[in-house]
Every structure is written in structure tokens, then in C-alpha cells.
Image: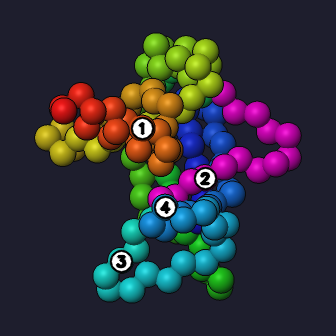
Amino acid sequence: MYIRLQRSESVQNFNVWVYRENNHEPVRGSGLFVNKNGVVCAHHFYMPKDGTNYSFLAGEYRLQIYAESVDEAPIKIFEQILTLTKYQEEEMKIRKVGAYFDWAPNTQNYLSHVDTGPKKDEELTDLIERLTDDRE
């Protein structure tokens, strides 16, 4: 699998794919079997390590996800328009963090926000302990 990201006339493939199941360590993707029940895992796509640099700028992006079988050409399995604001672009540069896109079922669209990412287990444990202490 890989993704193609297009903003205006700029196109970049993210061809390094890793996935995580049940909060285990990331595994480099090389194949995936999907049965009738489907597959649930977190997918991450990275740029090739060929010196390419990619800056996320404000604007509208067309995200396309491709899957490739051993004996067939790649097929597009998903496409979505995503938007980054100028504020989000600046926050990503300053804070060195990423943008997240959460599905909003009422608008049938993904809404973006800048975040530091998922909390580590230790951070969550500390937060739960503080909240529990505050209740006592």
C-alpha cells in the first residue's frame, strides 16, 4: 500500500507503510490479508529515504490510497479531500507536531486539528492518578 498526496500541482507519494495492531510495535507493511471480518490497525505512511523533503502547507489536499497485489497494477481504494489552515501550517512548523483528521459524521467530512499525538501510557497513568486524587 502507499498514498499519493496532491496539493495544487504538487504530488508526493508516501511509499513506506507500517501498521500497528493492538498498540504493539509498528510492523513494516509488506502484505495484508483481509478476511470477511475486516482488519483493524493503525496505518502510518512515510516518505522514501531518498532525501526528499515535503512541507505541509495550507490548502486543500487530495489524498489517494493505493493497494497493489503481487500480479496486478496498483488500484485506488480510497480518495478524500483534506484541508489544512494557515494556522495549522504554522503550528506544525513551530511545535514540530502533526495534523490529525477526525471523521465528522454529520458533515461527512474530515476535520483537521494540530495535536502532539497520542498520549504515552505513562502520561495517561499520571493523568488518571491526578484525576482520581482530585476526586478524593
Q: CA distance from mark 1 to mark 3?
A: 34 Å
Mark 4 vs mark 3: which is more N-terminal?
Answer: 4
> Quarter holding the C terminus?
top left
Q: CA distance from mark 1 to mark 4?
A: 19 Å
Mark 4 touches mark 3? (CB < 8 Å): no
Q: CA distance from mark 4 to mark 3?
A: 18 Å
Q: Where 57 falls versus 4 (above or below)?
A: above
Mark 1 vs mark 4: which is more N-terminal?
Answer: 4
Tell me if residue 74 can be seen. Answer: no
Q: Which residue corresponds to the image point at 34% horizontal and 39% vertical from the top-left?
A: 129
- Residue marked by disc 2: 45
- Residue marked by disc 1: 126
Pointer 1: residues within 10 angstroms few (<14), some, or many (20+)? few
Mark 1 touches mark 3? (CB < 8 Å): no
Tell me the amino acid under the disc marked 4: Asn
Where residue 112 sits, quadrant-wise, is top left
Q: Residue 23 shows which numbered tag? A: 4
Q: Is residue 24 left or right of residue 29?
A: left
Q: CA distance from mark 2 to mark 4?
A: 17 Å
Q: Where 80 falls versus 54 (above or below)?
A: below
Pointer 2: residues within 10 angstroms few (<14), some, or many (20+)? some
| Magenta span | 42-55
Where residue 40 sits, quadrant-wise, is bottom left
